[in-house]
Amino acid sequence: MNSENFDLIIIGTGPSGESAAINASKHGLSVALVDSRKIVGGNCTHQGTIPSKTLRHSVHSVMKFNRNPLFRAISEPKLLTFQQVMQSAEDTIKKQVSMRSRFYSRNDIPIFHGTASFKNDNTISIENDEEGNFELTAKQFIIATGSRPYRPSNVDFSHPRVFDSDKILTLKETPKRVIIYGAGVIGCEYASIFNGLGCKVDLVNPGDKLLSYMDDEISDALSYHLRSLGVLIRHSETFDSLKTEPDKIIVSLKSGKILKGDLFLWANGRAGNTEQLNLQAVGLEANKRGQLEVDTYYRTDVKNIYAVGDVIGAPALASASYDQGRCASSRIVDKEHPLLIEDIPTGIYTIPEISSVGKTESELTAAKVPYEVGKAYFKDTARAQITGEDVGVLKLLFHRETLALLGIHCFGDQSAEILHIGQAIMAQKGEGNTIEYFVTHTFNYPTMAEAYRVAALNGLNRL
């Protein structure tokens, strides 16, 4: 059995593994990456963020085309098939893999393909069906293996009409009626995608509202607009059983309701990818969700083994995972790197999309913080009127006395982009963080950034 030695071995080539590897390599460590796939990118590139957001973009584009009166002069409304929009996702994935492969090549980082498992705290075994098994040794390890959809035992995922968020990317036909169980980020995003493809969608939510951790007004806006597009949302419903037939699926809920459709998507929960790592060999144990406990610097209970990304649980965002990987590898090379910021922005790519950072109204009310609200509705901005994307609102929460920004919540087209302007101001210290910035500085016109000026003036007028 061949063996090679490195300063650092990283298991996983998703965002957290990539940033950790390149950062450590640039600081002089010999670094190797291990991935179970034959190509780099991790779940983010192949089964999560990149394909789902590309699908969403393609669907949103055809929805804009269909509702624009200008285009009716040249064409009737169009519907795309799932296979057509999936082709655009596959093209993007290829570009991502090519780009990320160049990153590793330029930094002289070797990549080993196969399933990794620990033999001890300095050695891993790589199982590769084509090239045979081999071992690698290192002084330090970073586990960046990501997560996968949780699969309950009473759901038959081998059936051709039953899917999770990984398997859905293999769908060959466009369904007519889709039942989605789980109304978190993944469930809401795929509800938007399938609705945009012309499918009837039942979105079954175990909770009493969509995205309960979001600001109430923003969550309510999403519910309203999904319903206005034809999505049937069923709150406070619990899955009981699933019956599969060749041409349909039948979902029974514990309330007694029975739903029928031709596709079922389970989108309720994820689990960390740790079951094949042989963690007991190094004295580690994952929790019931397959996740690992880490300290502030992402080190596990074994001093030379770190863990980053989805495998450690929340916030489980590609953006945060990238920063976690860089932070962990900086710790290993004895270089200071800022810890993950407290106010991590959230982007949810529904149609329309949502983005948020900072406190919600309910959190500020519970903490008895004297705050005020400033709003700008997209329909009142010139850029939104020009583009036709006039559904949405920018909402600023700020302290009544200091005018400091406390929270920013946006619903509508390009929300994830719009949010970062406010995030940059909110991150300033002292007098730099105040909504007065938006009324004392000039914004390009017409832009969506102008909404900040409108919202700030609206809030100041409330005072």
Image (cartoon, helix red, strand yellow):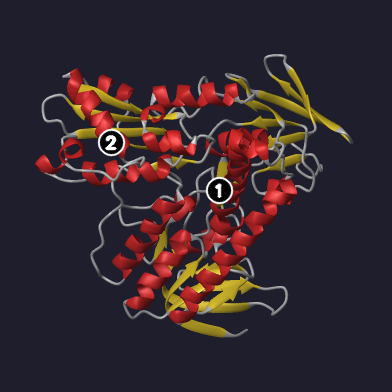
Q: CA distance from mark 2 to mark 1?
A: 26 Å
* Amino acid bearing label 2: Tyr
Q: Which residue is mark 2?
A: 452
The quarter of the displayed image where residue 111 is located: bottom right
Q: Secondary structure at mark 2?
A: helix
> Which residue does the image show at 72% across and 37% down from the upper left?
76
The quarter of the displayed image where residue 156 is located: top right
Is residue 266 in sight in this rendering? no
> Which residue does the image show at 21% across and 38% down from the upper left?
438
> Which residue does the image show at 72% across and 16% down from the upper left?
257
- For marks 2 and 1 on the same chain, the one whose residue lies earlier in the sequence: 1
**Dot 2 crowding, Cα within 10 Å, few <14, some 14–19, many 20+:** many
* Amino acid bearing label 1: Lys
Q: Is residue 285 left or right of residue 249?
A: left
x and y percentages locating residue 368 in the rendered image: 21, 20
Residue extending farthest to the top is: 256
x and y percentages locating residue 100 in the rendered image: 51, 69
Q: Is residue 31 left or right of residue 421?
A: right
Which is more toward the observer, 36 or 245? 245
x and y percentages locating residue 105 in the rendered image: 49, 80
Q: In this picture, is 444 found above or below 458?
A: below
**Dot 1 crowding, Cα within 10 Å, few <14, some 14–19, many 20+:** some
Task: Please count the marks in the image.
Answer: 2
x and y percentages locating residue 77 in the rendered image: 70, 36
Which is more toward the observer, 241 or 190? 190
Which disc, if any, is residue 207?
none
Q: Which residue is mark 1?
A: 53
**Quadrant containing the N terminus in the rendered view:** bottom right
The quarter of the displayed image where residue 154 is located: top right
